[in-house]
Image (tube, rainbow, N blue to C red):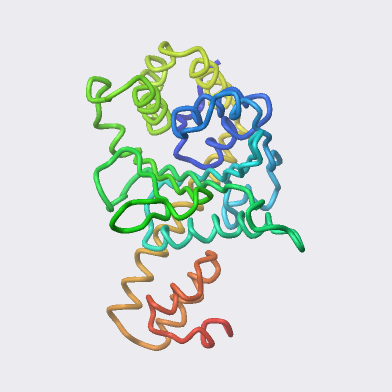
Amino acid sequence: MEKLFNITLRNDYAFKRVFGVDENKDILQDLLECILDIPPETIAGLELLDKEFHKELLSEKLGILDIKLRLKDGTFIDIEIQNRWHFDFPERTLYYWSKMYNEGVKQGQDYTKLPKCITINLIGKGFNKNKRLHNRYFILEQETKEPLVSKLEIHILNLEKARLLKESQCKDNKTKRLLNWLKFIETDDREVRKMLAETSKVMAKANDKIIVMEMSPKEKWLYDSRMKYENDRASCISEGYQQGLEEGSYQTKLETASIFKKLGIDIEKIAEGTGLSIEEIEKL
């Protein structure tokens, strides 16, 4: 049967379809082993916390398709893929981390018992903080680099950088495995994926799952819906933000703020970008 469309795992629906279901936990485990400094036996016991594809999350208008899981030692992890880097992403990922951490609080509980929480963000295009493939953010003392706590980790992986790197530039086998996974996720070229799949049995399994998706009209509709949602969101953010700043008209700022609010962007960030007050934005 002829394949119907080309997939890239930069699409969050396709990413969750491959990495976020029970039958593929070994695929997710292999990816996590390349990212985190956690014993493989701890990662092997991972439990997926949101395995369902809720109807409202599959529409072109609503929802963020992230992957939530818990490890054997109680560590919570949230994984999200973004096709494009947006100006509010640092605050957004910190918010999702704090939400995970806060949900671990139980009344009367010793704070030392709170779980470690990790967010992992894979960025398709536009990451502009640095040229690194893998960024690891912690709470550190500025001079000594001593960590205050070990319960906050935010990882940002640059897929655009991965496309340009070669295995020979990797310092160790773990980094090589990570680079291959990021190339696999980034590409929409079947031949590139096939070549990468030959380096790993687990990656070969992931490639087989993608081939099945490419032959399904239903999967095509769901994939295209998510791609349209992401493209519309990026367009609204880019055009609306610039318009709000440059034109300076009150009505334009209100319209821009309304779009941002519907997209779920933090109200304080909207206020900063449009010049409106938090009270004005809350009334929209």
Q: Quadrant of the C terminus?
A: bottom right
Instruction: Using residue 209 as the reference point, say whether residue 139 is left or right of it.
Output: left
Name the residue rendered at 42%, 55% in the picture: 139
- Residue 234 coordinates in the image, percent (x, y): 41, 57
Q: Nearer the viewer, residue 181 or 72?
A: 72
Q: Nearer the viewer, residue 219 or 160?
A: 160
- Residue 203 coordinates in the image, percent (x, y): 49, 19
Q: Is residue 263 above or below residue 46?
A: below
Q: Is residue 248 above or below residue 270?
A: below
Q: How many labels, in total?
A: 0
Name the residue rendered at 33%, 51% in the picture: 145
Name the residue rendered at 24%, 44% in the picture: 131
Instruction: Using residue 248 as the reference point, say whether residue 108 is left or right of it.
Output: right
Q: Is residue 74 above or below residue 102?
A: above
Instruction: Using residue 167 as the reference point, say whether residue 263 is left or right of it.
Output: right
Instruction: Using residue 220 as the reference point, say whether residue 128 is left or right of it.
Output: left
- Residue 40 coordinates in the image, percent (x, y): 55, 24
Name the residue rendered at 42%, 51% in the picture: 147
- Residue 32 coordinates in the image, percent (x, y): 51, 31
Q: Quadrant of residue 27?
A: top right
Q: Quadrant of the N terminus?
A: top right
Residue with the most extreme right position: 107
